Amino acid sequence: MMSRMEWALVMVSLAFLGVAAVSQRLVGTPITPAMLFVGFGLLVGPKALDGIDLSSTDSVVRILAEATLALVLFSDASRVDLSHLRRAVGVPLRLLAVGLPLTILLGAVAAAVLFGRLTVWEAVILGIVLAPTDAALGQAVVTEPRVPERIRQGLNVESGLNDGICVPLLFAAVAIADLESDISGGRSTARLLFEEIGYGVAGGAIAGVAIAVIIRAAGTRGLIAGQWYPVIPAAGAGLAYGTASALDGSGFIAAFVAGVVFRLGLGRDPEQLNRLTEEVGDVLSGVTFILFGAVLLGPTLTALSWQLILYAVLSLTLVRMIPVAIAMWGTHAGRPTLGFLGWFGPRGLASIVFAVIVVEESRLPEEHLIVLAVYLTVGLSVLAHGLTAGPLAARYATWYESHPRDRRPAMESAATEMTRPRGHATGALPGPARPGSF
């Protein structure tokens, strides 16, 4: 007889085979792989066919989710050219510097009003967990070439950076809300932040420098076989995460910093070098969404209340749209642009991981209510943003192109340096490096 774990492996494998078999047919349709993975998870979860029955606090779920987010943070950070971002004080910086804090604040206010039994800091935790966006859930938005580059860039960079920014905020909020939490470990909030951020930055910087030096120094001497190049960034992400975690720092901050330092040390977009990291991250992300549907979202759907449903809807609409409109104040962006930027803030992988961390590390009185709100919001986002990404991107592009070329909106038409969307590495693996090629 096969154990529960073996059956879970069978179910996950069948899901990937099924999605792979129709993957080309999904291109250009409103159906996304994430929707299929979550739907399959719901089907085989304990509330339906009972093919996967893992506790939401099971170490397997947490290890998988954390490994996935670490790889995603590393690859996202290494795709962004910070020098371009610093020069272009435009959409990405406005969304991150103004929109993100206001989204957290408004999300906390909505939670406090709808869920009266939450403490102030529990409401803040919920706001932080649901603040990061996941552009991969609306891939058509950031890959549709007809959508103005500046708008695609803004959403893409925002998604790549905001989850890393939210990590220390989450740890601080949990430490303040629950002094007995495993996150605080008896440390004061100030010490917690200092160690989480300090060791995270140090571990990430060391790992990022190490892999950049290895590629540049060993690569120029022809010491690295071509098939080993993609292994180096993946190992570097693991090195960053492991080093920081061993020192009681944030492995997520370390993975994020390692990606930034790696990009700076390499001096270019490590697209081909990151191929393995991104592909493994995509696979682990798919597994995470299957388990999310099976063991997290399924039970949530049996415990719905009007407050949970309303909060999920507000989180994906007004809680996102109002801060975006404020952040874009003074840019002369058109109303369709404000609506487009405001709607496409999908909640995905980072929110799932943050919720699992809250479950594992804290003993908050209303922990269960917090994670129910998170799981429902993410599930609704996977469906709503997946279905609307293609049609609304096309509609927005049609509005933009309806203006004569010499009279198109100035804000949307401004040139910008493009950052490669997640999961779109192209071409073959790099061959052996030639002297001077790095």
Image (tube, rainbow, N blue to C red):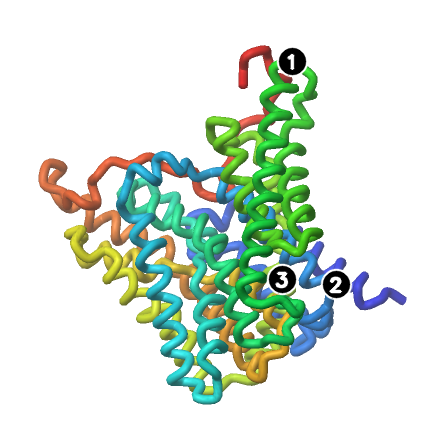
Q: Which residue is depicted at the point 65% across and 19% down?
A: 218
Residue 435 % position (x, y): 59, 11
Tell me the number on the disc at residue 221. Answer: 1
Residue labelled with disc 3: 290
Rendered image quadrant of residue 219:
top right
Q: Which residue is depicted at the point 58% across and 46% down?
A: 255
Q: Which residue is depicted at the point 37% across and 77% down?
A: 109
> How many numbered marks appear?
3
Q: Mark 2 is on which residue type?
A: Ala
Element at label 3 = helix
Q: Quadrant of the N terminus?
A: bottom right
Q: Mark 1 is on which residue type?
A: Arg
Residue found at the far right of this picture: 1
The residue closer to the viewer here, 15 or 187, is 187
User: Which comes sooner in the sequence, label 3 or label 1?
Assistant: 1
Element at label 1 = loop
The residue closer to the viewer here, 158 or 206, is 206
Q: Which residue is depicted at the point 54% across and 77% down?
A: 372
Residue labelled with disc 2: 8
Q: Badge 1: how crowded within 10 Å, few (<14), some, or many (20+)?
A: some
Residue 237 % position (x, y): 62, 42
Give the CA separation, mark 2 to mark 1. Answer: 46 Å
Q: Badge 2: how crowded within 10 Å, few (<14), some, or many (20+)?
A: many
Report if residue 22 is visible in the image: no
Report if residue 298 is visible in the image: yes
Circle nearer the viewer, 2 or 1: 1
Give the CA separation, mark 2 to mark 3. Answer: 10 Å
Image position of 98 (left or right of 66): left
The residue closer to the viewer here, 45 or 203, is 203
Q: Is label 2 in contact with label 3 (beta carbons under 8 Å)?
A: no
